[in-house]
């Protein structure tokens, strides 16, 4: 089964590259109608957006998540704790980005590939569509767990990003996702295949500030469909906050019930709930460099 999965991921990458080349060749004479700046950053909050660095540009992102508000005054409502994620996204071309990241939560290392298939405005096409794939490796469990195989520490997430800039203020995106675990955690209600639907957007308040939101309901675990609201075994991620753009930096300040900042974690492995104060204050800072 795992061998077929690897072949599946290779096919996805090949298909996305082939599709991109064909779409661009068909639409190359209509570049003046392209829609840009659908979002301010490559992240809505946790979810990836269709935005990506230009060719030979490095986008460096620092993500920080404090503890939960319900941890009490003795921990200054979560400020005493913190998790960090560092992301390096490099533009191989204007439409293909390679990324590598490290998270302090579970000591996870990720490698990712984002490919833009078509841009909103090409021949009046109404959406920007990208494909995002990420491979995660749990270094902590690799050191201390008794998993039978080293490959059990890998997991994979594939997302199709479909975004539309409605007008100069309002943008919207949906992100259907599939996560595959080589070895799902026995402590969580997980199957090898997990399916979710990320829903997010932003509203621009002025030239520098926008308000962002995202909700990521789990819709299927293995063969079992899950009600997005009446969900007893899984906690869906919900976050909202603000983008602030100043001097080449984009600051994102937000509240979220997700502790993890890597895809597999914030989509499927939430243990905190808004209703009982399991809310994290966090921020993302992104800065681009040209090489």
Image (cartoon, helix red, strand yellow):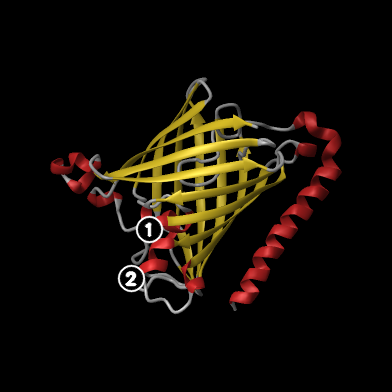
Residue 264 locus on image (x, y percent): 46, 58
Q: Quadrant of the C terminus?
A: top right
Residue 252 locus on image (x, y percent): 43, 33
Callout 2 crowding tier (Cα within 10 Å): few <14, some 14–19, many ≥20:
few
Q: Give me the residue at 74% from left, 59% from top.
A: 14
Residue 55 locus on image (x, y percent): 70, 37
Q: Give me the residue at 41% from left, 76% from top.
A: 147
Q: Give me the residue at 77% from left, 38% from top.
A: 122
Query: Secondary structure under badge 1?
Result: helix
Residue 140 locus on image (x, y percent): 38, 62
152 or 159, nearer to the observer? 152
Q: Quadrant of the N terminus?
A: bottom right
Q: Is residue 207 above or below residue 25?
A: above
- Quadrant hosting residue 106: bottom left
Left or right: 196 as drawn, with respect to 5? left
User: Between marks 2 and 1, how big is the CA–CA gap?
Assistant: 14 Å
Q: Which residue is mark 1?
A: 106
Q: Which residue is mark 2?
A: 187
Q: Earlier in the sequence, mark 2 or mark 1?
A: 1
Q: Is residue 233 above or below residue 15?
A: below
């Amino acid at each position: 089964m795992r061998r077929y999965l690897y072949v599946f991921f290779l096919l996805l990458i090949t298909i996305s590259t082939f599709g991109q080349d064909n779409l661009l060749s068909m639409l190359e004479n209509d570049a003046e109608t392209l829609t840009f700046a659908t979002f301010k950053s490559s992240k809505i909050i946790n979810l990836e957006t269709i935005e990506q660095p230009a060719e030979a540009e490095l986008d460096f992102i620092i993500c920080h998540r404090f503890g939960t508000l319900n941890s009490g005054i003795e921990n200054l409502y979560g400020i005493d704790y913190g998790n960090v994620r560092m992301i390096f996204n490099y533009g191989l071309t204007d439409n293909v980005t390679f990324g590598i990241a490290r998270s302090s939560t579970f000591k996870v290392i990720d490698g990712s590939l984002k490919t833009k298939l078509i841009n909103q405005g090409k021949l009046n096409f109404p959406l920007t569509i990208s494909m995002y794939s990420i491979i995660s490796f749990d270094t902590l469990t690799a050191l201390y767990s008794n998993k039978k195989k080293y490959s059990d520490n890998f997991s994979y997430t594939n997302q199709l990003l479909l975004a539309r800039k409605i007008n100069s203020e309002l943008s919207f995106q949906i992100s259907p996702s599939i996560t595959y675990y080589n070895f799902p955690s026995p402590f969580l209600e997980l199957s090898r295949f997990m399916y979710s639907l990320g829903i997010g957007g932003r509203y621009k308040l002025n030239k520098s500030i926008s308000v962002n939101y995202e909700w990521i309901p789990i819709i299927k675990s293995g063969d079992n469909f899950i009600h997005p609201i009446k969900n007893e075994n899984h906690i869906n991620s919900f976050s909202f906050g603000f983008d602030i753009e100043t001097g080449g930096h984009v600051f994102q300040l937000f509240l979220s019930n997700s502790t993890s900042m890597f895809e597999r974690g914030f989509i499927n492995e939430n243990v905190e709930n808004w209703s009982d104060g399991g809310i994290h204050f966090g921020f993302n800072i992104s800065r681009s460099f040209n090489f």
